[in-house]
Image (spheres, rainbow, N blue to C red):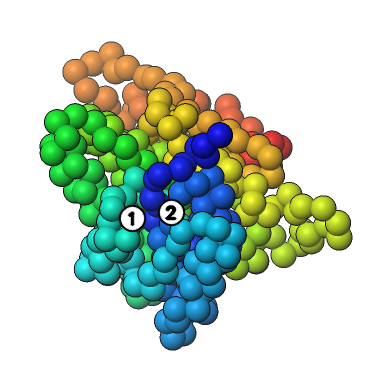
Amino acid sequence: MSLPLEGLSAVVTGAGRGLGRAEALELARLGASVVVNDYGRPGRDGSGESSAGPAEEVATEIRAAGGRAVAHTGDVADFEHARALVDLAVAEFGKLDVLVNNAGILRDRMVFSMTEEEWDAVIRVHLKGHFNTTRFASAHWRQRSKAAGGPVYGRIVNTSSEAFLAGSPGQPNYAAAKGGIVGLTTSTALALAKYGVTANVICPRARTRMTEDVFAGLAAPAEGLDPLAPEHVAPLVGYLASPAAARVNGQLLVVHGGMVAVVERPRVQAQFDSKQDTFTYDELDALLTPHYERRPEGETFAAAEALALKRR
């Protein structure tokens, strides 16, 4: 019996460690040939010297298990490096079928203390990095579709975060970048659907180098699989990359510890209409102030969302 991704090729960014590594291994297990991308800098803030080590180790692990893999150590936030990454997949495997964007860094600080460089660095790696690879992968699929005279196979899986959904007070740069990735994904999904390509975005919760502070108080169990292990996230990525997910497009999914939640697009909570040509200050005060005063004391959007996520 053939594997779900047999005959397909994939690029996984940030695949030398953590989530990206688990995703690359899962795609290979399902039959895909994989380009393992990782810039290889040791600091989770993007600091240190770049190294081929992490990407090469994962590619070697895939080949040792009988799969096909090559390493790429370029910086996906660099436009030309991203072009070379997609070109490598085509050169090695004949085409690109799946793109999984996972690379990222952290530069945490409260908004009133954040430097311009800390803002720019995180936006660059997360949001521009997602755009760069998407730009060249989508051009590849569009060209193939035109040559074929119809739809081709293409899958994009992007990585957002619950920091975007619920807010994260010490991560304004990270939350903004992750929100931008959702917008990029939904726009891409609409633009590429006619070529046969889908684009979806996940919000994973997992214990990795990036989240070591977040889950510092939640120790991994002495036995069995950690509920926060990246291996809980990887199967969803494998599914979204597969032919079975052909009807899944422009979707946002939260995933962790054996749970997948499909997130609805924002809905209108309340609507107020002016009784005049346009609102006056007094009319808005009479309508909106009571609406917010009726909410539980201290409840804000971020607090309410954070509480809902905690209860899941």
Mark nearer the N terminus (2 vs 1): 2
User: Is the residue 180 above or below the residue 123 in the image?
Assistant: above
The local secondary structure at tag 2 comes to strand
Residue at 58% x, 27% y is: 294
Image quarter of residue 62: bottom right
Amino acid carrying label 2: it is: Ser
- Extreme-bottom residue of the structure: 49
User: Would residue 279 be found to the left or right of residue 206 on screen?
Assistant: left
Location of the N terminus (image quadrant)? top right
Residue at 39% x, 45% y is: 8
Residues packed near mark 1 inside 10 Å, few (<14), some (14 to 19) or many (20 plus): many
User: Would residue 15 be found to the left or right of residue 230 on screen?
Assistant: left
Q: Which residue is mark 1?
A: 93
| Spot occupied by residue 295 in the image (x, y as percentages of width and height) | 59, 30
| Spot occupied by residue 55 in the image (x, y as percentages of width and height) | 48, 71
User: Is the residue 7 above or below the residue 248 in the image?
Assistant: below
Residue at 55% x, 58% y is: 66
Query: Would residue 286 be seen by someone viewing this image from the given angle?
Result: no
Residues packed near mark 2 inside 10 Å, few (<14), some (14 to 19) or many (20 plus): many
The dot on residue 33 is 2
Contact? badges 2 and 1 (CB < 8 Å): yes
Location of the C terminus (image quadrant)? top right
Q: Nearer the viewer, residue 200 or 217?
A: 200
Task: Measure the alpha-carbon separation of dots 2 and 1.
Answer: 7 Å
- Extreme-front residue of the structure: 1
User: Would residue 134 be found to the left or right of residue 218 on screen?
Assistant: left
The local secondary structure at tag 1 comes to helix
Q: Nearer the viewer, residue 206 or 66?
A: 66
User: Would residue 183 be found to the left or right of residue 69 on screen?
Assistant: left
